[in-house]
Image: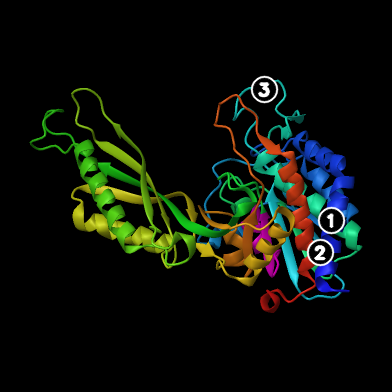
């Protein structure tokens, strides 16, 4: 059969399957939303993922944080304590011919129950106006449901896959060490990987998330000292005044790096690849007293060849050269190394082609994010990894609005993922695109 005709037939088979099973796919998303897995709490929704993966012939393994992550440059302590019943889930399924391997992953933990507001039942999955509303609908149970339903559709259409598949349902809202990074340490992965998460930028499937900026949070502490009298600066040092100098120095450093560090590729060519933001300033002291301690929290986002260590040491040296007095610079909780899959990489183009087959030709945005989970398979799993997902807009914290995911976009996501799964083992991606 003519290859183009064969491709058309496959696309029709995918769409026919989606149309036939539309209500089941919506019900699958609702079931996940209605099963709790709130931030740090027991992940009861993993029982659904485990059940569905095992129905599809996957061998499953629950796991928590692997202690080896603490030796990784990206490691940072989670800022919460995970409940005993909070766990990740990995599923693996062997193919029958190809030596290639593909990994799919998404995070199942949601914001806490009252993050967006106090609702009678945050786990009520409500369908209206072409959307499904409920806690985690967009972040990221929509991605988990797409993963499960895409696998179900591909196996129903083809009967088997030619390659090994790994599916990860991870806890990923706190830096990734508990979930994705631990999965890498345990040996899960693939030659190529897809992170499935609705696009919070609003770009939808036009966005290919293939660039992860490095990220480092830092805290600068400046110490003052009292004079003979509490308000006498002739011998004392006011930490607030020294901190004012420190902020100017940090801003000077940020301007310098923005001029030095620019992207030299793709649609971001010429734009700064280094950003320093002052987050907050605080101090201790009252009326009539010299402030004896001031703190500044700030964050740097950066790209290769910079690393968390090189950025930290460079800022420390810059401060040592310019800032007088007694001070201390410390790394904060969040840190991430920069990683990227090239815009014109064959796997990126393969994913783009699969998206175009479902939603039409598009000009794709190769989006960068600070500390995205796509970095873990790239840096620690030797895997080309990109992120894709449907359109979404998350409500603001405390807004009283519920998360939602557009049903048509959700179904398109399943069709895209099914197309990727059906095509992945049939061709030499590196030489055929």
For the residue pair 273 and 157, the one nearer the viewer reads as: 157
| Residue 371 rendering spot, x and y as whole percentages | 52, 54
Provide the secondary structure element on which disc 2 rests.
Answer: helix
Looking at the image, is mark 3 or mark 2 earlier in the sequence?
3
For the residue pair 40 and 417, the one nearer the viewer reads as: 417
Asked if labels 2 and 3 touch by Cβ distance under 8 angstroms, the answer is no
Residue at numbered disc 3: 119
| Residue 246 rendering spot, x and y as whole percentages | 24, 46
Residue at numbered disc 2: 422
Badge 1, how many Cα within 10 Å: few under 14, some, many 20+? many
Residue interval drawn in magenta: 179-195
| Viewport quadrant of the C terminus | bottom right
Looking at the image, is mark 2 or mark 1 earlier in the sequence?
1
The residue under the point 80% across, 68% down is 164
The image quadrant that residue 352 belongs to is bottom right
Residue at numbered disc 1: 14
Provide the secondary structure element on which disc 3 rests.
Answer: loop
Asked if labels 1 and 2 touch by Cβ distance under 8 angstroms, the answer is yes
Q: In this view, does 197 lie to the left or right of 213?
A: right
| Residue 274 rendering spot, x and y as whole percentages | 38, 57
Q: Is residue 128 visible in this depiction of the protein?
A: yes
The image quadrant that residue 384 belongs to is bottom right
Residue projecting furthest to the bottom: 431
- Foreground mark, 2 or 1, reads 1
């Amino acid at each position: 059969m003519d290859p183009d005709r064969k491709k058309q037939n496959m696309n029709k088979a995918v769409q026919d399957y989606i149309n036939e099973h539309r209500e089941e796919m919506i019900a699958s998303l609702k079931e996940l939303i209605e099963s709790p897995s709130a931030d740090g709490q027991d992940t009861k929704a993993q029982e659904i993922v485990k059940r569905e993966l095992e129905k599809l012939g996957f061998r499953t393994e629950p796991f928590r944080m692997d202690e080896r992550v603490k030796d990784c440059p990206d490691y940072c302590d989670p800022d919460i304590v995970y409940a005993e019943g909070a766990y990740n889930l990995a599923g693996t399924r062997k193919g029958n011919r190809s030596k290639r391997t593909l990994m799919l992953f998404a995070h199942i933990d949601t914001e806490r129950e009252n993050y967006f507001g106090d609702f009678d039942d945050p786990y009520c999955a409500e369908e209206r106006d072409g959307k499904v509303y409920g806690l985690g609908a967009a972040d990221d149970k929509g991605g988990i449901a797409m993963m499960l339903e895409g696998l179900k559709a591909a196996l129903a259409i083809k009967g088997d896959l030619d390659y090994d598949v790994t599916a990860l349902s991870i806890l990923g809202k706190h830096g990734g060490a508990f979930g994705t990074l631990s999965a890498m340490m345990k040996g899960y992965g693939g030659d190529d990987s897809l992170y499935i998460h609705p696009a919070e930028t609003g770009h939808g499937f036009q966005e290919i998330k293939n660039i992860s900026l490095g990220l480092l949070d830092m805290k600068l502490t400046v110490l003052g000292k009292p004079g003979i009298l509490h308000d006498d600066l002739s011998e004392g040092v006011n930490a607030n005044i020294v901190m004012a100098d420190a902020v100017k120095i940090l801003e000077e450093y940020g301007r310098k790096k923005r001029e030095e560090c620019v992207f030299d590729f793709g649609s971001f060519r010429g734009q700064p690849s280094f950003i320093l933001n002052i987050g907050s300033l605080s101090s201790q002291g009252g009326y009539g007293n010299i402030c004896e301690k001031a703190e500044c929290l700030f964050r740097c986002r950066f790209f290769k060849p910079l690393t968390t260590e090189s950025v930290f040491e460079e800022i420390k040296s810059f401060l040592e050269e310019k800032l007088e007095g007694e001070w201390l610079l410390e790394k904060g909780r969040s840190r991430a190394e920069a990683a990227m899959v090239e815009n014109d990489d064959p796997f990126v183009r393969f994913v783009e082609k699969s998206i175009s087959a479902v939603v039409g030709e598009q000009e794709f945005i190769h989006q960068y994010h600070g500390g995205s989970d796509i970095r873990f398979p790239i840096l620690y799993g030797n895997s080309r990894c990109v992120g894709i997902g449907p359109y979404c807009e998350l409500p603001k914290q405390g807004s009283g609005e519920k998360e939602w995911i557009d049903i048509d976009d959700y179904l398109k996501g399943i069709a895209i993922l099914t197309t990727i799964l059906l095509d992945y083992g049939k061709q030499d991606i590196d030489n055929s695109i």
